[in-house]
Image (cartoon, rainbow, N blue to C red):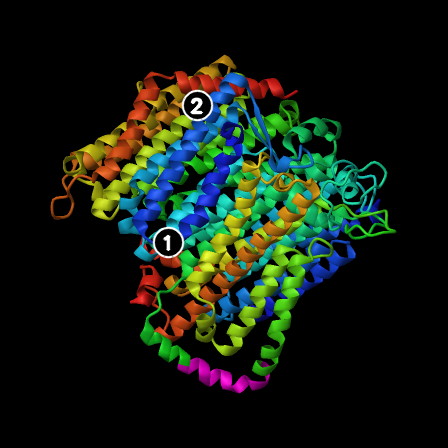
Amino acid sequence: MKDLFAVVMLLGIYGLLSASFFVSMDAVDVAFTEASVGAGISTLLMLTTITMVGRYEHAARHKPTLALAVILITGALLIYGTLDMPYFGSPHAPANLHVAPQYLNDAVPGLNNSKQEVGVPNVVTAVLASYRGFDTFGEAAVIFTAGVGVLALLSVVRRPEEDAEIDAINDSMHQQHLILRIVIKILIPFIFLFALYVQFHGDYGPGGGFQAGVIFAVAIILYAMLFGLSTARRVINQSLIQILAAVGVLIYGSVGLVSILNGGNFLDYSALSSDPVAGQHLGILVIELGVGITVTSVMLIIFFNFAGRRENRRVSGSVTGNNSKNSSATKAAR
Amino acid sequence: MILGLYNYWVVVVLMMTGFYIVIAQGNLIKKIVGLNIFQTSVFILYISMAKVEGGSAPILTDGISQYSNPLPHVLILTAIVVGIATTSLGLALAVRIKEAYGSIEEDEIQDRDNKEC
Amino acid sequence: MLVQHLPVLQVIVPLMAAPACLMLRRSSLAWLFSLIVSGTTFLISAVLLQQVMTSGTIIYELGGWSAPWGIEYRIDELNSYLLLIISAISTVILLAAHTSIEKEIPKDRHTFFYVLYLLSLAGMLGIVATGDAFNVFVFLEISSLSAYSLISLGKDRRSLWASYQYLIMGTIGATFILIGIGLMYQMTGTLNMEDLAKRLPEVAHTRTVFAAFAFFIVGVCLKLALFPLHLWMPNAYAYAPSIVTAFFAATSTKVAIYLLIRFTFSIFGLSFSFTTLPLQTIFLTLGLLGIFSASIAAIYQKNVKHLLAYSSVAQIGYMIVGYSISTTAGLMATLLHLFNHALMKGALFLALGAVMFRIGSTQLRDFQGLGRQMPITMAAIVVGGLSLIGVPLTVGFISKWYLVLAAIENGWWPIAALILLGSLLAIVYVWRIVEAAYFKEPSIDREPIKEAPLTFLVPVWILVTANIYFGVDTRLSVQVAQAASQSLFGVSP
């Protein structure tokens, strides 16, 4: 298959199918995230990349024997490993008997002799945000790292003269999509509302910071796609987004630090208020907010930088030649 | 036994497909696509571990007593985010490589590098 | 009161400093800030090491939840030893960063450099400090992603390609590790390392655990740059900015070796690890192959950075050979070499950075005549080279000594001989650098080159002096390495 566009579309469908598979496996939060991230953002980024690197693959002649050998060995090893696994769906698997039941018992008040430690019905959120909150902190740091990495790789210094040119190109292009623009203008506030709902309702239903952050970012990206990047940039200041990305991670960490100052360990939410369960709710609320802010900002940073790079190339002429050894960013900015 | 395990075997096949694409394909974008498929299949593996027969989603509601295991869900949420982070970095690198080398085919890039040395 | 929170502060300080650093737009401000943060992590690690050596393993429960329901940090001799190495090297190298990146990275990227550097530091510290298997994966990704970005900041366009290759191979490795962790979880139901160690023995005979082990080991070996999975390393180190190479050459593979040791000794257990797979033989062979193939490859390199990168692959081979001896003495030699190699390569790559700063290239032919024009820097490179060979009075000698001793103690005479043979090869490639610098005339007419600025000379000579100091007064490194090795052997069944 030589057409990369088709490849990317199929990848998007694969992501969507996985998401539906996750739903049937009772993993609703995961399905939500996979659908928004895997099928949504990922496809979007790949399409943007393809417009910059070329839609068709050049024919390559290579003998795949070594690769085939490697995957046959790896595959065989994996299947060998599955032979002793607990059967699919078995409630007696070690995984379902050891650590997990404690999480499940927690949130229901007065059930047998379980004490309510976190008090949040969505157990996945409880584990993600409280029990394993440090992992989620690391995850926020991962997404932040990716944002900074993309900034380091793709950010372009924009010159004011170029702006006028870019505006002209955009305006002419977008006049054609009048229907889309009107519809999107109506829809965007609802998308924002939905994102807020997902953010704050994550305790009681599927949702939480990540999913909300992505949806929020998608709304803004839709706007940018239809009304032009420069318009979007006027609405959303670039340096503001970078600061917000940092602030989100810092909010998360500060909750942990406040816990320490209140006498508990890092990220011990029970120390945040006199009633431990209320403290847990407060802690989870604030860190999910931090995560949401970071994810939105980073997704926007990534999109704006990818799209901005593409814009810059169109304006500054043809692609820099094969002999270029310098960093293209400096060249494009000159 | 087969009925209990075939689910895992399908996942293994998916994983190997993704893995093969990563190693065998020369186009940089296709490699990233393969990586994505590989990682997503690992997620499917984890999630199928979590499923409990007759259980429901791990959101506590009145009247339901059997739930699926929430811990792998948490792990996979993190892993999905890590996956998208890696993908975006990989794509950014591909864009820069295209600008610097004029191509995103592995053999063409290596040819150009060898000619310089 | 602050003292009890040190384990988490060790990782939190750089992790939170990184986003804060993003808001500092002036390059010098960002540099100063990173330097202070790195210095703080060094102080914390020193205090932690002292605590652990006197009162034993420190446990810290994150979120107030006890393991295995929450994540815990478990600092013992091995951890704190590595934390010290990483934070010390990071701080010394940062001293030279401001000057070095001025010529190697565009000005508008400087802030991003420092942010990524801090993230990388935090990631590595996080991998080492944690006692939870999945937490390892998360921080592994933090350090890897920042590494890919840092490497791509190099001037040469080949840095982009090297970074991409590293990204692909590194992500495959990380995904393998993820598969391994997943399979382990499936059979035991826990992610906490201590808990895994308790529960794995009952399921150790299953094929799933065998597969988990295999996947985990292969994944770690990719990150380790063990022959033949080392292909990403020489290019990644050669084309990255000098500071980045110095930092990673001294730290990132050490962290991977730590993971290997931690999982095989503390979690899977010594008897399991070495009997299920013929790990001893495999690692011994691969280690030796790595030493020889990489040393020979180093001899033929035209670029000094490539030369030293291949030398690093060889040195990792030595560490793996020590590991494969699987006695207390062998492991101690490996741990010692972790410390010493960090000092050696840190000094060498940093000195190379000085050369790069002054002449803009690290090709061997551009080194000709450098001995006279940059005497202090070249002297540092010579001492580093002597350390690589293993000349007495340098740390390299100490490592080789303990390694050979461990081999002989185990009755492996041919291996001891091979180790010494490897040193002979090192003499050849070090000589190439010395010969070019001191015994050849400059190949091109160029203006006289000044010596490297103080901001380079000071950190380089700190590391070089450490090379010699710890080669003479070995108490610190040997004591800690021995304590760590003994506790690891005591813990496993």
- Residue C182 occupies quadrant: top right
Q: Secondary structure at mark 1?
A: helix
Vertical relation: C77 (above or below) B45: above
Quick check: A13 left or right of C43? right
Write down the region rendered in magenta. Answer: A168-180
| Numbered tag placed on residue C336 in the rendering | 2
Q: Is residue C47 magenta?
A: no
Could you say which is closer to the camera, residue C245 or residue C402? Answer: C245
Residue for badge 1: C158
x 68%, y 30%: residue? C195
x 34%, y 40%: residue? C94
Instruction: Say which amino acid is labelled 2.
Output: Leu
- Pointer 1 indicates a residue of which chain? C
Instruction: Say which amino acid is labelled 1.
Output: Arg
- Residue C100 occupies quadrant: top left
Could you say which is closer to the camera, residue A125 or residue A23? Answer: A125
Using a 10 Å C-alpha cutoff, classify the residue at mark 1 as few (fewer than 14 neighbours), some (14 to 19) or many (20 or more).
many
